[in-house]
Each structure stands twice: as C-alpha cells, then as structure tokens.
C-alpha cells in the first residue's frame, strides 16, 4: 500500500471502514487530484486523505462537486 490512503462515501460515520477505502497513492498531489475527481460523483458527501507516514488525515466535505476542507475541531 502506498503512503496516501483515499477514503470516501455518502455518509461519514467517523468510524472508518474498509468499504470506504478507494485506493492508495504515492504522493499527496496525486491523492488530491483523485479526490477532486471523486467529488464530482453525486453520491459522495465526503473525502478523506490519510497520510500513513504522519498518521494524519485531511477531511473534505463535498459541496456542489467541489472539495471543502473541514476544520480540525480538536485544536
């Protein structure tokens, strides 16, 4: 598996799950490009890019086919 794991779905239950896994990519740029393409799917409500090396995730809400980064409410 490559460094950046891409997850997406219609409902974000914040529990994770293999069914939400789309694919893994080598670079953050590749992951973001793929996420932007996925956002155009009318049945996708959220996208997450997980960096396995730093153990961090960037979570996006999909609004009108575009990614909107969610703010981290844990800060």
Image (cartoon, rainbow, N blue to C red):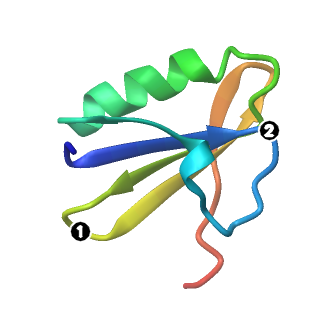
Residue 72 image offset from top left, x and y in percent: 59, 70
At 27% from the left and 39% from the top, the residue drawn is 28
Front-lying residue, 39 or 71 = 39
The answer to whether residue 55 is above or below residue 69 is below
Q: Pointer 2: residues within 10 angstroms few (<14), some, or many (20+)?
A: some
Which of the 4 image quadrants contains residue 55?
bottom left
Residue at horizontal 75 percent and vertical 54 percent from the top: 12
Q: Say which quadrant the C terminus sits in.
A: bottom right
Q: Which residue is mark 2?
A: 10
Q: Say above or below: 21 vs 56.
A: above
71 horizontally vs 25: left or right: right
| Residue 54: mark | 1
Residue drawn 80% across and 38% down?
Answer: 10
In terms of secondary structure, where does tag 2 sit? loop
The label on residue 40 is: none
Judged by depth in the image, the label closer to the viewer, 1 or 2, is 2
Q: Quadrant of residue 20?
A: top right
Give the image location of residue 68, x and y in percent.
Answer: 65, 40
Q: Closest to the observer: 75 or 8?
A: 8
Residue displayed at 61% across by 45% down: 19
């Amino acid at each position: 598996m490559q460094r950046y794991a891409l997850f997406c779905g219609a409902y974000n239950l914040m529990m994770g799950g293999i069914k939400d896994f789309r694919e893994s990519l080598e670079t953050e740029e590749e992951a973001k490009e793929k996420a932007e393409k996925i956002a155009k799917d009318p049945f996708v409500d959220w996208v997450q890019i997980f960096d396995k090396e730093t153990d961090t995730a960037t979570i996006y809400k999909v609004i009108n086919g575009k990614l909107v980064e969610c703010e981290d409410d844990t800060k």
